[in-house]
Amino acid sequence: MAANGKAATEKVPAFANPLSEEPTGIASNINYHAQFNPHFSPFKFEPDQAFFATAESVRDRLIKQWNETFLHFHKVDPKQTYYLSMEYLQGRALTNAIGNLNIQDAYADALNKLGHELEEIVEQEKDAALGNGGLGRLASCFLDSMATLNLPAWGYGLRYKYGLFKQRITKQGQEEIAEDWLEKFSPWEVVRHDVVFPVRFFGRVEVNPDESRKWVGGEVVQALAYDVPIPGYKTKNTISLRLWEAKSCAENFNLFLFNDGQYESAAKLHSGAQQICAVLYPGDATENGKLLRLKQQFFLCSASLQDIILRFKERRSGKGSWQWSEFPGKVAVQLNDTHPTLAIPELMRLLMDDEGLGWDEAWDVTTRTIAYTNHTVLPEALEKWSQPVMWKLLPRHMEIIEEIDKRFLAMINASRPDLEHKLSSMRILDHNPQKPVVRMANLCVVSSHTVNGVAQLHSDILKAELFADFVSIWPTKFQNKTNGITPRRWLHFCSPELSNIITKWLKTDQWVTNLNLLSGLQKFADNADLQNEWASAKMANKQRLAQYILHVTGVSIDPNSLFDIQVKRIHEYKRQLLNILGAIYRYKKLKEMSPEQRKNTTPRTFMIGGKAFATYTNAKRIVKLVNDVGEVVNNDPEVNSYLKVVFVPNYNVSVAEKLIPGSELSQHISTAGMEASGTSNMKFALNGCLIIGTLDGANVEIREEIGEDNFFLFGARADEVPRLRKERENGLFKPDPRFEEAKQFIRSGAFGSYDYNPLLDSLEGNSGYGRGDYFLVGHDFPSYMDAQARIDEVYKDRKKWLKMSILSTAGSGKFSSDRTIAQYAKEIWNIEECRVP
């Protein structure tokens, strides 16, 4: 192919043709980039080189649209939203960019002229490693929808060099290695050498004679902007994800020390700056780890707000006199979870100390600008930062937080004396002498104009439990915004066969931007022709997935078996343990059957994937258990044509784009009340995959939309969970014999000699740390197994299963991120479309 590619490039003239939409001009532009923007030795045009040249050719077009969008926003000066997130899980950009620009066919032809296939070139791209899970992927879907809806909006994040980690599976289980997405470079980003802001850490607060305050001293790093273009679907609007990188100036490099042989000391500030954007979520068990995480969060907030303020002032210049009170009319800042909470005291500091506003005016501006999205009810995920660490790193911000806390207490004492006994849990500063902390979620609720949850059930729990006392003070502050996913990446581009069938039967492709049109499929759900086309599209996706699984794991799986998939971060509340215990019980029963009995079972392939956080021991034990079970089951000739168990390594966006279209059943089985929303459930449902799940997160709404009969429900409800935990503590739980049998089978050594007792012990006993089955795996096991038995029966009825699959897609219209973002724009941000003409 490479020689072929090189020979082909010699036939195509190399000249710049950045805006061409026809294959010959595009091929010339790709060849121009290969020759005149070289990143490799000459005389090579292998897939790797072809990818970078192709991406740069697409980027030409994006940069033009992006400049036009930026100029248009500058001229119209609409109110804009700035979305702050510690994570973005962008995935690959090439397919998405040429798809949104509607030039995929022209690019495929152009690459053919150059001796390459588009499919192969796409595979050369590495996923951008800027996120971890649903929170980051949601932010990326939101950007796609903001651009597609022509909204004036920007994303802000950090440019992590090594991401979270790349997962490797060995005999010992999960091993973490650094991501290499920037090993060469990213062809999409544009570095903005003129967009640099100073960010300070440590230091002290100086009080001036007029009582004004100034944060001085400490160490200062530079935040340098890298912009990634985000094109909307079939629109000229192209917005930006601005990623910050931390740098240190040349003058901070101590030549005297270096020449004295003290190399590490000479570069101390440089290496300190590099650490800030090295890794997403660095381990925080140590004081240094906590400081680094806090530095990352502040670095994002400070650089982004300085940028936002500068842009606001630039747009005011030359427009006569203006007031800071106009700021919230032009700027909306959305905090994606509590990670960017420091935007609140930082905006206050910038307004008071740099711009000279008084407290009341600065507070009015800040509280009308900032809104907060809560993503979790898990207590350990609601951030609480040590007060001594905060005082050390951010002394001026702690003064501001103290003042916000003091004024909040005064307001409650004056207007709500009935809440006085609740103040210790409501206030921002927890002064527990053993462990004084700042409660970030409380700071967000007190300081934001709007707080939203991410699914109806989650928002109800926030209002009834987590933030109930705040609701009694500010009843209108709390909203629900059920999450959504972009139908472009998650159906139109990742499953072209199914996408074409939908367009054919609906007689329009408008569903790609108006997902509610999918309901038009309902009337065809029983149609034999549609069912046959649907089944063949699903089979093509299953075969593609089987090839991929063979390639990455060496395990061969049967596309005629039921493909059952659970992919998400590995966490005890997501209950991958329940899934694998069910598979273990199924294996044991298959072993006990005669060959004749086995023939009557429904063959099934279980696939589980996801990363366990590096320091989360039980999650890593679950990864090891899945792999150990697979090793035994897949090599057991008696049962391996009826059951396979596969752990899919290094789960990321690109892996999801192969797994989701090929799945027929997916598991969303968290303990009810613990998953805020979930978004992979929406992706699977949209792709005609049926769900086995609990009444948790967005499962509740998915089941309502697609119909209860098309959802395999099991398990305790959220409102029953506290009572069930109490009964467990009181020794009233009676385990199902099947549950005991599955655990005993592991303990018998059937899956090797590894000691799984510490993992299984979390399911035993009635109380105590790490015991007592907090996530109700034992309680839900019998109803889970019964639901799985129902699934086996329904799958045997091909027509019934296909009808349910079609109805699943037909009922997924609500779960478009276009709907979610339109609601944020109208009900929280108060921004309007600003379409580039």
Image (cartoon, helix red, strand yellow):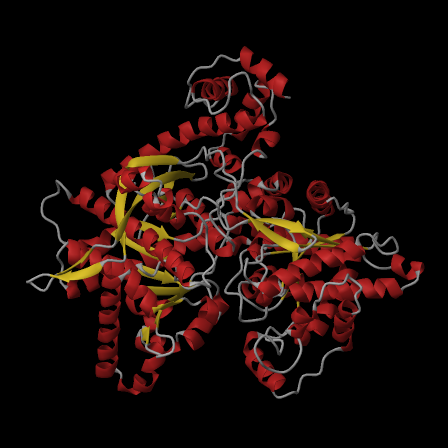
**Residue 220 location, x and y as percent?**
26, 49
**Residue 338 location, x and y as percent?**
39, 62
Q: Is residue 608 above or below residue 253?
A: below
Extreme residue in the front direction: 260
| Left or right of 326, for residue 578 | right
Extreme residue in the left direction: 209
Location of the N terminus by quadrant is top right
Q: Quadrant of residue 256?
A: top left
Q: Is residue 445 above or below residue 662?
A: below
Is there any visible trace of residue 604 in the rendered image?
no
**Residue 736 location, x and y as percent?**
74, 78
Is there any visible trace of residue 78 in the rendered image?
yes
Camera-side residue of 711 and 132: 132
Location of the C terminus by quadrant is top left
The mark tally for this picture is: 0
| Left or right of 136, for residue 711 | right
| Left or right of 181, for residue 727 | right
Camera-side residue of 715 and 794: 715
